[in-house]
Image (cartoon, rainbow, N blue to C red):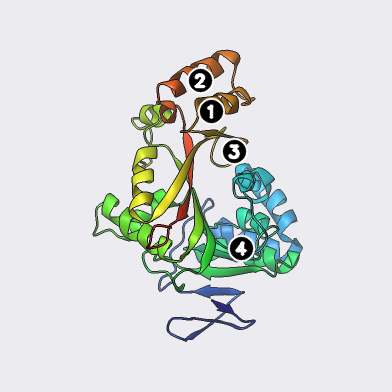
Amino acid sequence: MCFESEAWACPECRGRYPLRDGIVSFNESDRYYGELPRHEMQELLALAEGSGWKDAATSYLQTRNPELIKTIMDPRRTSWRSLLDLSGQETVLDFGCGLGGASALLAEQASQVVSLDGCYDRIRFLSIRKKQDDLHNIHLICNGTPHRLPFADQSFDLIILNMVFPYLYVTLPRHDPAAADQIIMTEIVRTLKHGGRLYLSVRNGRSLHQLRSRFSSRDDFVYHGYAYYKRLLAGCSIDRVHGYWLIPNYKYPEHFVPLEGQRASIASAISRVTQFSSAKKSVAAAISRLGGLSFLAESISLLGTRVSPSGR
């Protein structure tokens, strides 16, 4: 990858793509999606440019979507960084960066952060924040075809898929969801260096909570369980996978309970969960001994490493 002040140079085709608002866009359509209606998103962007992104977010969103303020500004958004042991030399892809709350925090610890989203208006907010906060090591890409990424093989040391992957299969409507997942994950892993790591967080489609809510929810997306994602990653050369129960949820995780491993380590992690009563801790510990802890986990994450072709 080669980022310049006025353009992005593609290492594959050797083409140069101009930047608009600091963003390289590969989208052919102007499709919008997000947490706000589009006209409100446009108003937020105008305020962010005029009065500053932080003041705009706290004032404008307070009466429209106060939860979005936390999404943008709460440092717990990337508490999973504690699992990564970053050296500061990494090039990171924040895939599905949205308004950029996670990207801005990752930029404090990584050498370079490539923030990618399929919606131009959402990533535009991050471009404003980048300029105002002088986040020089963030690079912005708008791309709505996750099965065709504008990056060379082995570009990244770390790829973050924070609650975005379950929504990507709809970009391949001619494939069934499982086949689309395989195609998209294969393409994502292609851009990960051998020995690089991938962090994936999702709603656990096989949790008791998700199974109960399935009958009342209007959410049309397909959510799978821990075993499904572990198989998917293994089929894409992601090995040494560690799974975690995210508590209280994937948005603002404070505790990471291992889903597999030594019983003593799992029990110790459960005992430290401040949101659990003594009774719930006892139940969770008992279920973990039976190997069914993932059924309690509403949100899960998987952290794995890409193995080389030789398996080393």
What secondary structure is found at the residue carrying circle 1?
Answer: helix
Q: Name the secondary structure under disc 3.
A: loop
Q: Earlier in the sequence, mark 4 or mark 2?
A: 4
Q: Name the residue under label 3.
A: 253
Indicate which disc, 3 or 1, sits on the residue closer to the N terminus. Answer: 3
Q: Which of marks 4 and 3 is nearer the N terminus?
A: 4
Q: Is residue 220 something one can see in this rendering?
A: no
Q: Which residue type does callout 4 highlight?
A: Glu
Mark 2 packing: few (<14 Cα in 10 Å), some, or many (20+)?
A: many
Return the residue at label 1: 266
Residue 172 % position (x, y): 30, 60
Q: Which residue is drawn at 71% across and 69% down?
A: 131
Q: Quadrant of residue 212 in the image?
A: top left
The residue tagged 4 is 90
Q: Callout 3 environment at 10 Å: few (<14), some (14 to 19), or many (20+)?
A: some
Residue 260 location in percent, x, y?
46, 33
Which one is in front in this view, the residue at disc 4 or the one at disc 3?
4
Q: Residues within 10 Å of mark 1 (few under 14, many from 20)?
A: many
